[in-house]
Image (spheres, rainbow, N blue to C red):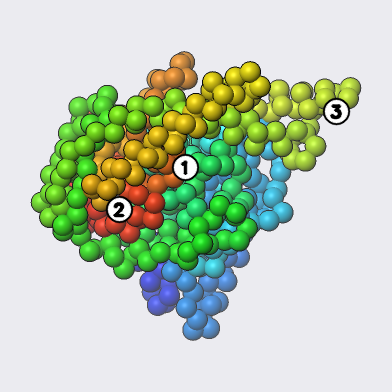
Amino acid sequence: MNTAVQIASDVQHGASSAVHELANAMTAIGERNEELHVFLHVDEEGATRAAHRVDAAVARGEHAGALAGVPIAIKDNMCQRGVPTTCASKILEGWRPPYNATVIDRLLAAGAVPVGKTNLDEFAMGSSTENSAFGPTRNPLDPSRVPGGSSGGSAAAVAANMTPLAIGSDTGGSIRQPAALCGLVGVKPTYGLVSRYGLIAFASSLDQIGPFAKTVTDAATLLEVLAGHDRMDSTSLPEPSPSLVAHVNDGVVGKRVGVVPELIEGADDDVVDAVQRALGALRDAGASVVELSIPELRLGLSAYYLIAPAEASSNLARFDGVRYGLRVDGVDVAAMNEATRTAGFGDEVKRRIMLGTYALSAGYYDAYYGQALKVRTQMINAFARAYRDVDFLVGATTPSVAFAFGEKTSNPLTMYLSDVFTIPSNLTGDAAISVPFGYGEAHLPIGVQLLGPGRSEALLFRAARVLEVADGRS
Ligand code: GLN
């Protein structure tokens, strides 16, 4: 499959058309969607209309946008007008949003063609897509294994060559972890860089939307389209979209890269080895390597699993059987609320709501939620100190390559541990990228994570590009 950048250029110059590219995507989806369960809904009609609009713009001699005619897959926790949006939950079955998320409007304005909504862990809570109420997604590289999660469907769409691009959301790793497990570039942008308007909230202080792509340049191109101030999101950064693509080949000469033992601790040998080789590649490209320790990293997981459920318990209160989707009747309103939520939410979502409600309850607020917020502040300070000595950090994205179905479902804690390396950047609000680098067990891809301070995306893309070249991917 061509890259997104190539497709957009071909469509703009008449060597291809948006309608033709959409037909290719539909063929690929038709071939493997049943086996892999990537899309919960394919919007062929809406996609066809969008493709015709792009072709008409090109025919009029207009510039059709940076993603002209590029098919893209959308995680099903983002609102698209008139298109079913479920968060992979029974509680939203049948709901069609009356408005577009800001990212959808930006994609359409850039000529992209949204082809459908992808599977996820229910309400983005999970790391394997096994928590979807509609059944799991399979990893296209090895269908006996998970694609990661929670944005597993979006990662699988790109890995299976159904669409060259996809978008996901990352609250504790849900873009970077599936990107690593499916051999893709995945980006968790700086908090506030991409508008959350129309993203169904999981944990509002941690959620960010970001890109999946096969190449660094495609991911940078997509992030440029998604980013920039939006007055509909009060946490949106005031600046316009940064310039990323123009700098991807600028290299890392003279940059200081930090290696942190806590960002590989407990990872499998093949993953540790890939991180070491990535450091070697960055050094060969002219960066200097600095060793440092951030012990606060060890507290991240515990703080996250109080803060994220606390926010989720509040955000998910709106699904009450009155305003959206499912309603199960009862003798009075309270009974209806209870029956709807009992039938509509799956086990993991209920677990998070209970954990969060407990952490926020009067007698325990200070002991749990309050403590977690203090840890979060310590983490923010620790990273800020580290970034005085280094420009960016390198570590593992995940402790292992893609794991088998059922391997981590019996004990929620082992599933939570898959996010130990990705959660810190959500707590600090900083930027991070996962880039494929080498292969591990069973020839499955390994993701190396690059972490930087807020608004360091341009530098992280440059470093990711160095690794992409060193890994012989282009
Ligand atoms: N796996 C983590 C969780 O279950 C992160 C999910 C996410 O980033 N949406 O909370």
306 to the left or right of 451: right
* Mark 1, secondary structure of its residue: strand
* Mark 2, secondary structure of its residue: helix
Q: Residue at x 57, y 71 (%)?
A: 53
Does the closest atom of ligand 1 sit within 8 Å of the Cβ of label 3? no
Vertical relation: 297 (above or below) 1: above
454 to the left or right of 390: right
- Three-letter amino acid code of the residue under disc 2: Leu
Observer able to see residue 132: no
The reply to whether discs 3 and 1 touch (Cβ–Cβ < 8 Å) is: no
Dividing the image into 4 quarters, which one contains the C terminus?
Answer: bottom left
Mark 3 and mark 1 lie on one chain; the one further toward the N terminus is 1
80 to the left or right of 419: right
Disc number for residue 423? none
Does the closest atom of ligand 1 sit within 8 Å of the Cβ of label 2? no
Q: Farthest residue in the top direction?
A: 410
In percent of width and height, residue 471 lies at 18, 48
Q: CA distance from mark 3 to mark 1?
A: 34 Å
Does the closest atom of ligand 1 sit within 8 Å of the Cβ of label 1? yes
Q: Return the residue at label 2.
A: 460
- Three-letter amino acid code of the residue under disc 1: Asp
- Three-letter amino acid code of the residue under disc 3: Val
In percent of width and height, residue 107 lies at 52, 62
Q: Residue at x 56, y 24 (%)?
A: 366
Q: Return the residue at label 3.
A: 333
In percent of width and height, residue 449 lies at 30, 42
In percent of width and height, residue 227 lies at 47, 60
Q: Residues within 10 Å of mark 2 (few under 14, many from 20)?
A: many
Q: Return the residue at label 1.
A: 170
